Image (cartoon, rainbow, N blue to C red):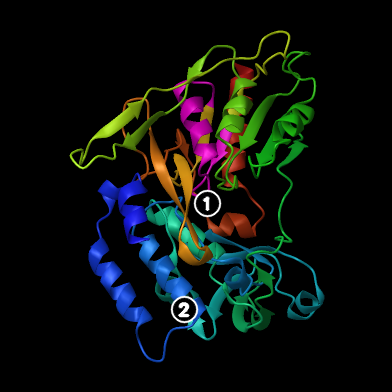
Amino acid sequence: MWSVARYNDAYWDDVRANWDSAFAATVKFTGERPAPTDLQFYYRLRRWTALLNDGQVELLPPTALANRIARPPLELRSIERRPFIIDYAVNDEMRVARPERLAEILAVQGIPAAEWIRDSVLPKIAGANEASRWERAVARMLEGERGTALHLLLRVPGGAERGASVTRSVALTSHWPLEHEPIEADTLPDGVIWIRVYSLADPDVLEQFDRTLGDAPREGPRHRGLILDLRETAWTPQGRARSYALLSRLIERPVLTPWRRMPVYRPDSSGVWLSIPPDTIWPPTQRERIAYTGPVAVLISARTSGPAEDFLVAFQTGGRGATFGEPSAGSSGTTTALTLPGGWKIRLTAARDVLPNGKDFERTGIAPQFPVGVRVEDVLAGRDAVLDRARAYLDDTARR
């Protein structure tokens, strides 16, 4: 791991920690008596890889170990850096625990939630910027040894506090029961079509997008506008080509993709980078389809990462529409999965994306043109401030 990261990670020049010292500390940890368990070893390696500040780094343990790591079937989200239960999979345990959607987790095992995340979770989470790291830490804050129980203190909607016991039952290798369809859509009362993209990994995502958008382009923009929601678009090692193909359905003139930069691997090339010029995304030909020409708004958050950020850079560069929400995760670029001994693997960013002006965006993420903060009071009241702001923009556009 020490050498693989040094020679392959495209963010190596941005590592601020002492990598060699972390290596020595990790080796010392493995030699302690009593010897650490496999699970303790895994989490120690996670703490080490988190020092890379690479939002796409992923340590993949052997299958036998991955089967022992699990979390309760709860979908968690950070709202103003406070953990909330967004959804849960209904099973026998959840019928008893009754966690309630939009309940806030106040404490885990008697430890205040903020301290639990800061001390027990955040050091093991890789991220390009602090906002993204915190989002990921909340999502994984209940992960641990499979079959172990956790006691949570919840504040349910309405303000009452109560306890709930949950079990880490869904292993890393298991299907996540709360997984969304790649694309979900609704037509809102004002005539705006709202398309939520959850994953670009599915090979059928473009077909689903075309089917969702329907015949709107051929009839002219019969919809009042299109809101493309990328706030929950999951990171995936695949998907760049699909993100560009999706954008091609929304443009009438060519747009440019991000630049890519790769470190040059030669003994005498320290600090030397190979720049790969941007590609061009072309609109569809008349034979393929007619591009959607109505107004478009894109929603983003600190959970928007990977191929969704590739889409976002090209979308903003081409001036196709407006973006709303919070800065993205800053975790983009080409990744590579490298095999380590003992059945382990590590995925690293091998080439990083930069804006057309040559600036990196991994530390700040891609800023929306119209910043909209997400507040607890809005969420508890059932308001989606980012969506509402985008709808107001499309309404103004339609009036002009």
Query: Which contiguous range is marked in magenta?
Result: 298-321
Q: Is residue 248 above or below residue 335?
A: above
The part of the image, by quadrant, that contains residue 127 is bottom left
Residue 316 within the magenta-colored segment of the rendering: yes
Q: Left or right of 381: which side holds 188?
A: right
Whichever of labels 2 and 1 marks the residue nearer the N terminus, that label is 2
Q: Position of residue 266 (x, y in %)?
A: 25, 39
Tag count: 2
Q: Can residue 328 be seen by looking at this rendering? A: no
Which quarter shows the N terminus? bottom left
Residue on which the image places disc 2: 40
Q: Position of residue 343 (x, y in %)?
A: 53, 64
- Secondary structure at numbered mark 1: loop
Residue on which the image places disc 1: 374
Q: Residue furthest left?
A: 268
Quick one: label 2, few (<14), some, or many (20+) residues within 10 Å?
some
As shown in the figure, which amino acid type bears the numbered disc 1?
Val
